[in-house]
Structures are given as C-alpha cells and as structure tokens.
Image (cartoon, rainbow, N blue to C red):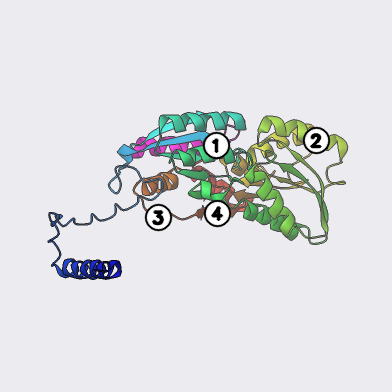
C-alpha cells in the first residue's frame, strides 16, 4: 500500500471517529442543588437627617437640646433665656445651656462641647453672622441637626435645618417709616446700632436705609453693642459732637437697652423727653416705660419668646418629620398712646 493511501485512510478514520464522538449524547451535567428562593428584603427606609433612634415615637423625655446662648446683654436676651429654660421645665426635655458673654469663640466652644455630648439637637442664636461654617459642618458630620434661632448666620443653609426668629430687615423698615411720617420735610438722624456683624444690627440697618426717605439723612451711626453700659458713652460722644435738636432731630436705636443707656446721657446733657424723635426696637417693659415717660415715640416689636416654637420644631426633627426652612415671628409696632395700658400685660 502506498504511503498516500495509508494517510488517506488515517484521515478518514479520524473524521469518522470525531463524528461518532460528536453524536454521543452529552453526559448529564451534574445538577447543582437548587438554591432556596431568597426573598429580597425591603430596603431599609433611610432615616431623614437628624431623626433619632426613637423616631417616630420620640417624646420630649428623649430630647437633649443644646442652647449656647450668646450672652445676657439685654432684657430681651434675659427673656429669651427664660423662655428656653421654662419650656425645658414645662415639657421635660433636658437643656444644655451656656452663656457666651457675647463672644463668638465661647459660643463655638459650647457648640463643640454639645457635639461631644451627643445632644439630640442644637438651637443656636448666633452672636454674629459670619464664622460659624466650620463648627456647623462638625455638627452636621456628627449627624446633629441645628436650628438657627433669633439672628441669622451667613453659613451655607445646607448646614442647618431651619431659622426661627424676627425679620430684622422689616424691623428696620418699620423704624424708617416712623421717621418718614414724622419728618415729611426732611431731617437728620443718628443711629445707635447693635453688635457689629450681628444679624440683628445688619438687618435693621439695611431695612432702615431701604425705606428712609431721601430727605432724611443719617448724620452718624455708631455701635452700642446692644447694652446700656456701652450705649451711654456713645450717646455722650454724639452729644459732644452734634447739637441735639439743631444738628439732628431724631435717633434710631437698635434696642431698648441701648435706648435706656442713651436716655441717661440725654438727661445729663439737659435734653428733655420729646425734644428728639426716638424710635427703638424690642418692646420690652423698659421700652414701654420709656414711651410712657415721653422718651420713645415708637417701639418696634422683636419677640424673644421663642422657646415653645423651637422645642416643637426640635421634636419634629427627632421624629423625622419635615419642618419649615424659615419661621418669621409675626410682630408689630407699639406707640405711647396705649403703652400704659399694655405695660402690665407685657411678659418681658
Ligand atoms: O437679636 C435680638 C436682639 O438682641 C435684640 O433686639 C436685643 O435686645 C438683643 O440683645
């Protein structure tokens, strides 16, 4: 047999063998044991930021509220502090209270201490607008919700849940309207401003300038830091520089305590009640008395009794409920004509 014939036969045999193997039924695959059917667990509902473990059934007994109060500079502030302490006693939540003595660094330390303690919520009345970004970020990273109370902050709104307080710009506008009514033919006024950089002073100054008629000039503006003690020398310095009644006809004062300090300086300089048109802010008992005595011709209300609203909002946050981003207090303007009648019922 020729070699080519042998090769031909081998190739044919190989092809036939391949075909035979290819036609064999496939070996039964060893069946994997059937997996038990796994029921997909429902994805755990994500808790809203700030919701506590007790949500949705938290009560005030579960709440620890941090209130790093900015100071004790005025009767308004005293009433604000009392409002939070009273609410804590009435509703039964724990209040971690501190007094920063109008110093931002003290407030920031107090907030850090509250973060370490793991409070349920921080309610912050910021002494000034700027400079809280870092500590608010720390609170946010710790999962603690923050409510901004009273004055505003310039920090990114994503770092806090809500702001509850007065519309400071509107207060300044209301004060300006009083001067516009009194001096349709124009006048010069002084401004005794609140703490520099505070939301209250910034807002009131802005509102005042927004609405003041162009024929009324602001002769000078200085801060009295919202206190009687600091307003008195500022008013004395004004009176050395400008003649009351001649150089200026009115004063816009950012709070009643500074107004009371200013009255001391005015009295000492021989100015009489009614010689100047004075508009103040707050509506404290001291402000009402100044209206009764003839010193203030209007007092723009700023309500410090924020404890109940803030406590209610804090509980909602703990329970994962939605809250409003901004809650502005409904306020008014008080006048001397019914000040004596209203004074006995004033709560602050
Ligand atoms: O932020 C509110 C202001 O602060 C009040 O007008 C003033 O009396 C207080 O000190």
Disc 3 and disc 2 in contact, CB within 8 angstroms = no
How far apart in space, not on screen, are marks 2 and 4 (Cα)?
A: 34 Å
How far apart in space, not on screen, are marks 3 and 2 (Cα)?
A: 56 Å
Circle nearer the N terminus (3, 4): 3
Look at the picture and state if 196 lies above or below 6: above
Please tell me which residue is depicted at 56% across the width and 40% down the height of the picture. 285
Q: What SS does tag 2 mark? A: loop
Instruction: Give the label on residue 270, or none.
Output: 2
Magenta region, residue range: 70-91
In the picture, which quadrant includes the N terminus?
bottom left
How far apart in space, not on screen, are marks 3 and 1 (Cα)?
A: 24 Å
List x then y, in percent, for residue 336.
63, 50
Please tell me which residue is depicted at 36% across the width and 35% down the height of the picture. 89
Q: What SS does tag 3 mark? A: loop
Can residue 101 be seen in this snapshot?
Answer: no
Residue 71 in which image quadrant: top right
Instruction: Give the label on residue 145, or none.
Output: none
Instruction: Give the label on residue 322, or none.
Output: 3
List x then y, in percent, for residue 41.
23, 54
Q: Is mark 1 within 8 Å of ligand 1?
A: no
Q: What SS does tag 4 mark? A: loop
Q: Is mark 3 within 8 Å of ligand 1?
A: no
How far apart in space, not on screen, are marks 2 and 1 (Cα)?
A: 49 Å
How far apart in space, not on screen, are marks 1 and 4 (Cα)?
A: 31 Å
- Residue 118 placement, left or right of 254: left
């Amino acid at each position: 047999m020729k070699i080519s014939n042998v090769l031909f036969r081998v190739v044919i045999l190989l092809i036939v063998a391949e075909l035979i193997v290819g036609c064999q039924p496939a070996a039964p695959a060893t069946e994997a044991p059937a997996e038990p059917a796994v029921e997909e667990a429902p994805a755990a509902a994500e808790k809203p930021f700030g919701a506590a473990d007790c949500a949705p059934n938290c009560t005030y007994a579960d709440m620890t509220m941090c209130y790093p109060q900015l100071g004790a500079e005025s009767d308004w502030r005293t009433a604000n502090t009392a409002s939070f302490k009273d609410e804590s006693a009435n509703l039964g939540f724990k209040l971690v209270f501190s007094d920063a003595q109008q110093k931002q660094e003290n407030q920031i330390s107090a907030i850090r201490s509250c973060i370490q303690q793991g409070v349920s919520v921080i309610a912050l009345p910021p002494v000034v607008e700027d400079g809280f970004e870092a500590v608010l970020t720390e609170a946010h990273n710790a999962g603690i919700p923050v409510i901004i109370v009273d004055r505003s902050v310039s920090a990114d709104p994503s770092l806090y849940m809500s702001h509850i307080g007065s519309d400071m710009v509107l207060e300044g506008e209301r004060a300006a309207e009083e001067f516009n009514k009194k001096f349709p033919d124009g006048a010069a006024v002084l401004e005794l401003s609140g703490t520099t950089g505070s939301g209250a002073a910034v807002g009131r100054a802005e509102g005042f300038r927004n609405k003041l008629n162009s024929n009324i000039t602001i002769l000078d503006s200085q801060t009295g830091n919202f206190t009687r003690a600091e307003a008195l020398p500022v008013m004395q310095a004004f009176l050395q520089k400008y003649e009351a009644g001649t150089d200026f006809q009115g004063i816009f004062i950012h709070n009643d305590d500074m107004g009371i300090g200013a009255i001391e300086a005015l009295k000492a300089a021989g100015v009489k009640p009614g010689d100047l048109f004075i508009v103040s802010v707050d509506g404290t008992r001291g402000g009402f008395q100044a209206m009764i005595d003839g010193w203030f011709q209007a007092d723009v209300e700023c309500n410090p009794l924020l404890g109940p609203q803030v406590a209610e909002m804090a509980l909602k946050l703990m329970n994962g409920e939605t809250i409003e981003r901004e809650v502005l207090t409904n306020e008014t303007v008080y006048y001397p004509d019914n000040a004596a009648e209203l004074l006995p019922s004033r709560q602050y």
